Amino acid sequence: MICIFLGAPGSGKGTQAKKVCASLHLTYIGTGEILRENVASGTELGKRVKSILEAGHLVDDDTMIEIIEERIKNEDSFLMDGFPRTVRQAEAIDGLFEKYGKKVDSVIFLDVDAPEVTKRILGRFSCPVCGKDFNVYTDDIKDRRCPADGARLLQRSDDTEETVRERIEEYARKTAPLKEFYEKRNILMNVPGTGSPGEIFERITEALDNKN
Ligand SMILES: [Zn+2]
């Protein structure tokens, strides 16, 4: 099975994707991970990625496709998280998969509405002393202090209400055509991303079961 995971920042997509992989024995292919792997490997491609990232640029689509090709050519069952993000990228993925006789079986869209993801992201704090991350809305936190050492928790400086709202709106705008692209093919599954992590996980595996 080949599965693609879509979901806004703060939707819990990454966590759920990894759980699904563990449970269904799929290889997890996350954009962040494969970029780091490539840089660490020191191959020609890895060196190129390193210089792109060090210059503070985003990795371009062609390079990304090259990296994904290396990663997937010998994999039969995997889940992609973080790519594609645009229709152009989805078409490139189709072309690549065709070359290896593969196709996307299902696309999960983890659906969490904008006010909810905004709240989740704005709730993210970390402890300057022990480095642990918390969510002041969902974890048992008193007075925004670390339960282990009592230090005052700090919010990420780029997590302001305005920047978060912009990020989420941008995601929705970019993802809408991509959802439509997979909807037309009848492989998009909209899974509500609210409730406990266990409930969400069940919904996802159920959707994948019904599909296959
Ligand atoms: Zn702490």
Image (cartoon, rainbow, N blue to C red):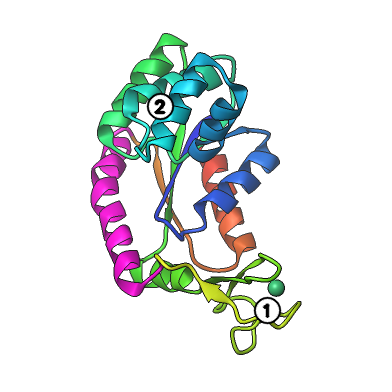
**Image check: 163 left or right of 147?**
left
Q: Which residues are magenta?
A: 159-185
Looking at the rendering, which quadrant does residue 141 occupy? bottom right
Tell me the residue at 68%/34% (across/down). 25
Looking at the rendering, which quadrant does residue 78 occupy? top right
Q: Is residue 130 visible?
A: yes
Identity, as a three-letter code, of the amino acid under mark 1 = Cys
Residue matched to label 1: 146
Q: Position of residue 147 (x, y in %)?
A: 72, 80
Tell me the residue at 46%/12% (across/down). 101
Residues 176 and 152: in front is 152
For ligand 1, which image quadrant applies? bottom right
Q: Is residue 157 above or below residue 77?
A: below
Label 2 CA crowd tier, 10 Å (few <14, some 14–19, many 20+): some
Q: Position of residue 24 (x, y in %)?
A: 66, 38
Identity, as a three-letter code, of the amino acid under mark 2 = Met
Asked if the magenta segment contains residue 164, the reply would be yes
Residue matched to label 2: 64
Q: Is residue 19 above or below residue 146?
A: above
Q: Secondary structure at mark 1?
A: loop
**Image check: 126 left or right of 180?**
right
